[in-house]
Amino acid sequence: MSNKQYSLEELGWKKTFKDQLSTKEEEIFLPARVTMTHKGHVVVSTGDSEHLLKIAEKGIGSLNQQPTVGDWLLLDKNSIVPERLLERTSLLQRMAPGQEVKLQPIAANIDTLFIVSSCNSEFNLNRIERYICLALEAGVNFVLVLTKEDLTEEAQKYRKKAKKLFEDIETITINGKDHESVQKLHKWFEKGETVVLLGSSGVGKTTLLNTINGTTKEKTGSIRESDEKGRHTTTTRSLHVMPSGALLIDVPGIRELQLHDCQAGINRAFAEIVEAEDMCRFSDCSHQQEPGCAVRDALEQGTLDQRRLDNYLKLKEEAEKNTDNIAEKQKRKSGKKNKYSRKWKK
Ligand SMILES: Nc1nc2c(ncn2[C@@H]2O[C@H](COP(=O)(O)OP(=O)(O)OP(=O)(O)O)[C@@H](O)[C@H]2O)c(=O)[nH]1
Ligand SMILES: [Mg+2]
Ligand SMILES: [Zn+2]
């Protein structure tokens, strides 16, 4: 963020956050929004000033969870130590990449998710469906933004394919480098509204941010010619105040969006499959050999799409497995704590 000063409202402060503070708390605490997260630290802004907070192994100050970009914290007015993380209106999270079983918050207090994909070989229906599940589960509004329309004759073909993924999904094709083209997104940029850009590396998230801002301030990077893959240019999550007064969050390119605890989102994203499943004779039908399988019937009649079915089954299994693994880990953790407390009492 720049050195400019903002009011809390200009940073996205709303009644739902204010309502979480008692009169006493309003006196002693300063609300601050997380405007940047990077390895080991977060930057928060109170509107008047910015502060860098280190993340210790156990979190920051007395917070019981790790803050992420978009979060609201209450800081002690004197010491600037964070005391409390305000309840989020929404949270986008995924399984952390790597071997360790843990969750990673992506962004919090989001009004709209821009699922960014480009009109080239990066475009992938299965991947876009993951993002749709994530948005539906988190209860945030979402829009599909297809960049690089200027580099192909087939932008409308991509758009048509994408539109079929979900009823009424808003799908906008743009040239992210062109100021006029980007105007198509303006209705989501109302003052105080928070929009997050998510997508693979190289799809043009930062380019879009710069064009909307009318600057070249944030670093962008070319994609590889051989496979059109990005080079993971952006390495921090950051929140920016747009000229319209909206808040735009840019995030590093996502390699893998592994879903966690996403059953409701998946069911809504694949409603036609869930509907067919309900008509299978057996409630635990695997849609393989069972008699009276409505899903196989629908496939044969061409009313269900095999690709969507395969992706649905895959996402469902993955999300269930991840949910179980996290629950298992939490159980082990709380078991450990109990053991220690027993030891102390002896
Ligand atoms: N022609 C054209 N090029 C674009 C468009 N959007 C992005 N680019 C180019 O695509 C490349 C990647 O853009 P970035 O904005 O760095 O992509 P990113 O999504 O931020 O990538 P990461 O930060 O790695 O996640 C750059 O060379 C941009 O100039 C577009 O709509 N049209
Ligand atoms: Mg970027
Ligand atoms: Zn079946």
Image: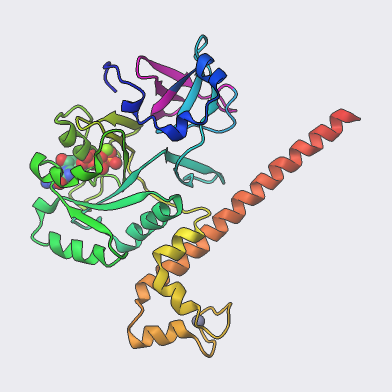
Residue 110 in view here:
yes
Q: Is residue 222 visible?
A: no
**Which quarter is ligand 2 in?**
top left
Q: Residue at x 57, y 21 (%)?
A: 61
Q: How many marks?
A: 0
**How was this image coloured?**
rainbow
**Quarter of the C terminus within the rendering:** top right
The answer to which image quadrant residue 10 occupies is: top left
Q: Which residue is at the far bottom?
A: 291
Residue farthest to the top?
78
Measured from the top left, where is residue 327 in percent x and y?
Answer: 63, 50
Direction from residue 265 to residue 22 in the image, left or right:
right
Vertical placement of residue 192 versus 23, above or below: below
Locate residue 12 relative to residue 58 in the image: left or right. left
What is the magenta range? Answer: 32-61
Tell me: residue 216, above or below residue 302: above
Image coordinates for residue 87, horizontal then vertical, percent: 51, 36
The residue sitting at 8% across, 42% down in the picture is 180
Residue 59 belongs to magenta span:
yes
**Residue drawn at (18%, 31%) of the image:** 213
Whole-percent x, y for residue 283 in the image:
58, 79
Of residues 14 and 298, the one drawn nearer to the viewer in this rendering: 14
Q: Position of residue 309 (x, y in %)?
A: 41, 73
Residue 188 placement: quadrant: top left
Q: Tell me which corner region of the image, top left, top right, bottom left or bottom right, holds residue 129.
A: bottom left
| Pick the front one: 265 or 102 | 265
